[in-house]
Amino acid sequence: MHIWVDADACPNPIKDILFRAAQRCKVPLTLVANHNIRVPSSPLIKAIQVESGFDVADNYIVQRVSPGNIVITSDIPLAAEAVEKGAEVISPRGEHFTKANIRQRLAMRNLMEELRTIGEVRGGPPSMSNTERQQFANALDRLLAK
């Protein structure tokens, strides 16, 4: 098992939960981003800085993820590719993406992108709540216990 994090937009409180979980469960954790990320000194935890560019971090993860790995991302196309490769995928808000729900989420993402393009929808998601942090921690614990 390996935990991969699409770290470009991953909130710091979620990273802290991941750092503690990796240490507690002795699971390798890799954060991938196109900027430098500070991580605790641990043989289990590393950060990979990829070149800037569209989907560079996502492609790095997809090329290395394997069945049984866990991927943390809010990027729905990345989630779809990771699910297809047999990985478990959860968002930083605790949503578990599966083969049963990923196509619906991808369709909704595409619709919202179209609505934003034509100006019908503005803004992004609300700030992360404590409840969502707890949902993430619970979802992560369930996957680590499998």
Image (cartoon, rainbow, N blue to C red):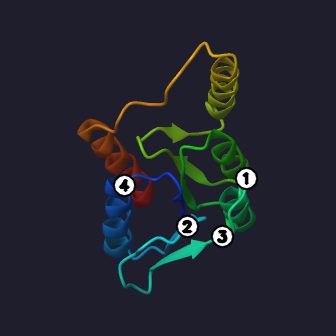
Residue furthest top as drawn: 120
From the image, tell me which residue sits under label 3: 50
Q: Secondary structure at mark 3?
A: loop
Q: CA distance from mark 3 to mark 4?
A: 21 Å
Residue 21 in the image: x percent, y percent? 34, 66
From the image, tell me which residue sits under label 2: 35
From the image, tell me which residue sits under label 1: 54
Sequence-first tag of 3 and 4: 4
Residue furthest left as drawn: 130
CB-based contact (under 8 Å), mark 1 and mark 2 = no
Tell me which corner region of the image, top left, top right, bottom left or bottom right, holds residue 130.
top left
Residue 110 in the image: x percent, y percent? 70, 26
The N terminus - image quarter: bottom right
User: Which amino acid, mark 4?
Assistant: Ile
CB-based contact (under 8 Å), mark 1 and mark 4 = no
Which of discs 3 and 4 lies nearer the camera? The answer is 3
